[in-house]
Image (cartoon, helix red, strand yellow):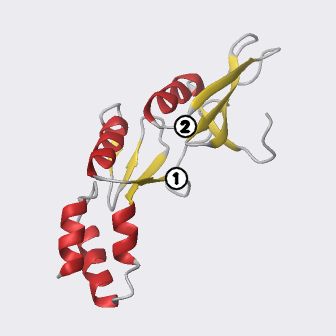
């Protein structure tokens, strides 16, 4: 690992599958080295993939095949800024249609339990609008959504 700070994500034996999916789905994402266990360990055997180095949208990560003890939850998420509805739709669908699940306000969860916020830049601009009434309208529209619909957000912002 070349990075001084790396996000370590715990998996139940499928870190390489997750890393491969992320690399195929997100720009500036790659799978790096796979390190195999030099001996048996509580949730695996010698020779099993123990760790996988990968990058998700430029963020260095390490997938650790630690077993079923720990599960992901919404306390950690990747927030991905999207530039338009097509990118928002593509990323949302890639996650949800690959065994994931929808949630509210632009959040979804992949099949490994990792949470993603697929967040259009237009949404962030709308809810931080200096016109607080416009920001509130956009925020209230977002609160009714699962996947973010940029046209609806922009219409709400305009009033």
Q: Residue 23: x percent and y percent?
A: 52, 30
Q: Is residue 134 above or below residue 12?
A: below
**Mark 2: few/some/many CA within 10 Å (<14, 14-19, 20+):** few
Query: In the image, which disc is placed on residue 30?
Result: none
Q: Residue 92: x percent and y percent?
A: 33, 44
Q: Quadrant of the N terminus?
A: top right
Q: Quadrant of the C terminus?
A: bottom left
Of badges 2 and 1, nearer the viewer stands: 2
For residue 66, side relative to residue 72 (left or right): right
Q: Residue 87: x percent and y percent?
A: 33, 45
Viewer-proximal residue, 12 or 54?
Answer: 54
**Mark 1: few/some/many CA within 10 Å (<14, 14-19, 20+):** some
Q: Is residue 124 above or below residue 37?
A: below
Secondary structure under badge 2?
Answer: loop
Would you say the residues marked 2 and 1 are in contact, meaning their CB atoms lie under 8 Å apart? no
Where is residue 152, by image quadrant? bottom left
Where is residue 39, by image quadrant? top right
Q: Provide the residue designation for mark 2.
A: 28
Q: Residue at x 36, y 42 (%)?
A: 91
Viewer-proximal residue, 69 or 87?
Answer: 87
Q: Residue 98: x percent and y percent?
A: 35, 31
Of all residues, the one furthest to the top in this rendering is 47
Q: Residue at x 24, y 78 (%)?
A: 157
Q: Residue at x 28, y 58 (%)?
A: 148
Q: Provide the residue designation for mark 1.
A: 77
Where is residue 8, by image quadrant? top right
Q: Residue at x 27, y 84 (%)?
A: 134
For residue 22, side relative to residue 15 (left or right): left
Secondary structure under badge 1?
Answer: strand
């Amino acid at each position: 690992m070349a990075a001084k700070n790396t996000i370590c994500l715990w998996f139940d034996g499928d870190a390489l599958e997750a890393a491969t999916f992320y690399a195929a789905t997100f720009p500036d994402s790659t799978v790096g080295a796979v390190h195999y266990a030099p001996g048996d360990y509580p949730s695996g055997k010698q020779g099993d993939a123990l760790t996988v180095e990968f990058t998700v949208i430029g963020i260095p990560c390490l997938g650790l095949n630690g077993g079923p003890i720990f599960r992901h939850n919404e306390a950690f998420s990747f927030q991905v800024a999207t530039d338009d509805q097509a990118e928002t739709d593509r990323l949302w669908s890639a996650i949800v249609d690959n065994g994931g699940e929808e949630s509210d306000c632009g959040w979804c969860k992949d099949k490994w339990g990792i949470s993603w916020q697929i967040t259009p830049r237009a949404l962030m601009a709308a809810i931080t609008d200096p016109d607080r009434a416009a920001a509130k309208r956009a925020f209230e529209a977002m609160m009714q959504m699962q996947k973010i619909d940029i046209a609806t957000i922009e219409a709400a912002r305009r009033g």
